[in-house]
Amino acid sequence: MAQDSSAAAATGGSTLVIPGEMAARVDRLPMSFMAWEICLIVQVGWACAASTDGIAQRLYPFVWLPAHVITHSQYNVLYALQVGISILLGGYALGWLADKIGRRPALILSSVLAAVFIWPFGYVTNYPALFVLSIFDTLGFAGYLAMNVVYMSEIMGPTWRRKVMLPCQAVCIFLLFVVIGGILPHYWFPVHYRWFLWFLTIVNILIAVVLFFRMPESPRWLEARERRDEARQVVERMEARVMKRHPVLPEPVLKPYEVVAEEKTSWLAPFHRQYVLVTALLLVVMVLGYGGIVYGGGSQIILWLIGKGGYSAGGSSP
């Protein structure tokens, strides 16, 4: 086993180059049930949080429109808030928070946020209240968008990372679009639509609990912040689980590993001189391109399909 190395050496400014022992020890681990378990938990969390995204798309045609709660224009605004500003704010804030407090607590918080802000849609009918609620609706899902792939990449070695991540993502896409987004709303909307909202609340809380007990912090994140004792404890627990089936592990190769640690990063960094033009361009592209074509078109196509094709809330013919 590699020995502990000396303290990090300053290289000038606010950047430090520190030894990459923990990253090397993670990368030499073989494919194991532990990696599958961690990735599946995180991806199921992503699918459950994603199910809260754009909830107005189901509530408007089946609940709000028959009850004359909101107009079509108001629906467009609520939907845009849910899939637009909420995603933007949540991805930025929770992504920044994940770099400050860690991947694990930030993902747990994301699941809690997804649960907290979805169930009120079953009881709130006041448009100003729905407006505010829609801004907070997908903060949790946005956190997963910012972190889930980053965390899975940090917890596994590059040689077999894709072999675990891609199947897990495929399984959870099926869970999202077929089970949670298809079968359940098909049978629960419109009569029992509150069941669907409470189901999303409960499963997201359960995911937060499972993450708390089964998700280790990223050793790479810990090491990059010079919390090497904590990183070593996490890696040793990971190694102990893997060694149940792989008693002999190869020695970590430390030579190619250097971890760059940033001491301080301002949350206004994307708006600093070297990034501001790219930030502005990406915002325009996301608002006019991705938001309008992907989400904007989808919000209206579903209404046309429901009206002309007799589609149910699950996206199939009743």
Image (cartoon, rainbow, N blue to C red):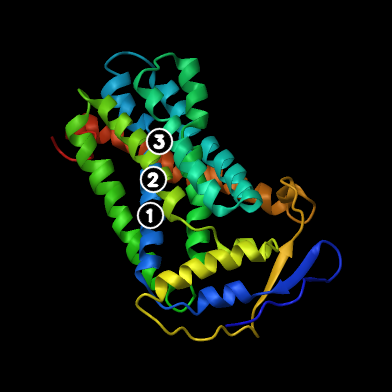
Quick one: SS at disc 1? Answer: helix
Work out whether mark 3 precedes mark 2 in sequence or the reverse, and give the earlier one.
3
Q: Is residue 152 above or below residue 213?
A: below
Q: Where residue 220 appears, x then y in whole percent?
A: 59, 66
Question: Mark 3 or mark 1, which is nearer to you?
Answer: 1
Any mark on residue 41, and which?
1
Q: Circle 2: is it few (<14), some (14-19), or many (20+) Cα within 10 Å?
A: many
Residue at image point 48% right, 40% down = 140
Residue 42, position in %: x, y?
A: 41, 54
Identity, as a three-letter code, of the amino acid under mark 2:
Ile
Q: Nearer the viewer, residue 302 or 237?
A: 237
303 sits to left or right of 228: left
Quadrant in which the N terminus appears: bottom right
The reply to whether discs 1 and 2 touch (Cβ–Cβ < 8 Å) is yes
Image quarter where the C terminus lies is top left
Q: Which residue is mark 3?
A: 54
Q: Is residue 50 visible?
A: no
Type of residue at label 3?
Gly
Q: Is residue 169 left or right of residue 222?
A: left
Question: Tag 2 or tag 1, which sits nearer the N-term?
Answer: 1
In terms of depth relative to the viewer, which is nearer, 101 or 250? 250
- Whether 307 is drawn above or below 3: the answer is above
Left or right, 22 with reference to 167: right
Q: Looking at the picture, how far across and down is residue 294, in whole percent?
A: 42, 45
- Rounded to the nearest angstrom, the CA distance separating label 3 from label 2 is 20 Å
Residue 145: image location, x then y, percent? 49, 50
Which amino acid, mark 1?
Ile
| Mark 3 and mark 1: Cα distance apart in space | 23 Å
Disc 2 designates what residue? 207
Q: Give the alpha-carbon distance from disc 1 to disc 2, as whole Å.
A: 7 Å
Residue at x 60% of width, y 65% of height: 231
- Find numbered disc 3 in the image and state the secondary structure of the residue it sits on: loop
